[in-house]
Amino acid sequence: YAHLLENCVRDDTRAEDAFNKAIQASGGKDARALASFALFRARTREDDLDDNRRLFQQAVDADPNNGPNLAAFAVYLNSVLAEPEEADALFSKAIQVAPNNGDIIGGYASFVAEVLHDNDSAEVYYKRAIEADPENAVNLGKFAYFLHAVRGDLHLADLHYQRAVQCGNNAEIL
């Protein structure tokens, strides 16, 4: 219900109330609700860094083997708190617990390329992400951009861009 209020009704006050009720009802143990609320709070209360971090940590503590939650926390640690070492460790754990999740692997590939500047490893992770989910238009598009911008391989980039467009229904890849 909180997602409906947030994304469709666009009522952040009621959405926050619904998130709080869901978390209370679970005794603060529902990893999915905690992670969703942490993402919501990161968007709506950007300046509340300590509380947002605490929510992400609670989500991970509630289910330490939830790859998407680990990856979401990693993104937050890197992009908001500028803690790339901690983000790297969480991404690694996320991939360990969800080794076939193309979204997680693709997110890590972007992190490795853009933050760690390890292009050889990034390429390996982009290929793994595409192998895990061959029709993931976002990963195909990001890998195509990497091939074009970093490797200078216009032919291979073009092939991946074309695949991304065929698979995608999302303008992010364009």
Image (cartoon, grey):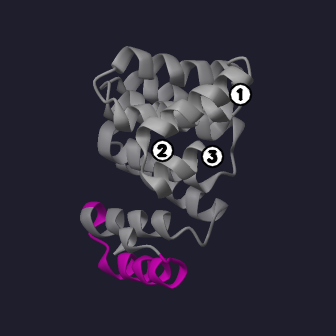
Q: Residue at x 37, y 38 (%)?
A: 43
Circle 3: element type: loop
Residue 29, position in %: x, y? 72, 21
Q: Is residue 44 left or right of residue 27?
A: left
Circle 2: element type: helix
Q: Earlier in the sequence, mark 3 or mark 1?
A: 3
Q: How crowded is mark 3: few (under 14 residues within 10 Å), some or many (20 or more)?
A: few
Q: Distance between the residues labelled 3 and 2?
A: 30 Å
Q: In this view, does 59 lie to the left or right of 25?
A: left
Query: Label 3 is placed on what type of residue?
Result: Tyr
Q: Residues within 10 Å of mark 1 (few under 14, many from 20)?
A: some
Q: Residue at x 43, y 82 (%)?
A: 159
Query: Label 1 is placed on what type of residue?
Result: Asp
Residue 100, position in %: x, y? 69, 51
* Residue range highlighted in magenta: 150-169
Q: Name the residue under label 1.
A: 30
Q: In this view, does 85 lie to the left or right of 150?
A: right
Residue 167, position in %: x, y? 54, 79
Q: In which quarter of the image is residue 41?
A: top left
Q: Name the residue under label 2.
A: 108
Mark number, residue 66: none
Mark number, residue 1: 3
Which of 14/24 is in front?
14
Q: Distance between the residues labelled 1 and 2?
A: 25 Å
Q: How crowded is mark 2: few (under 14 residues within 10 Å), some or many (20 or more)?
A: many
Q: In this view, does 77 lie to the left or right of 17?
A: left
**Of circles 3 and 1, which is in front?**
3
Which of 43/174 is in front?
43
Residue 131, position in %: x, y? 63, 63
Q: Earlier in the sequence, mark 3 or mark 2?
A: 3
- With respect to residue 106, does 39 lie above or below? above
Query: Label 2 is placed on what type of residue?
Result: Tyr
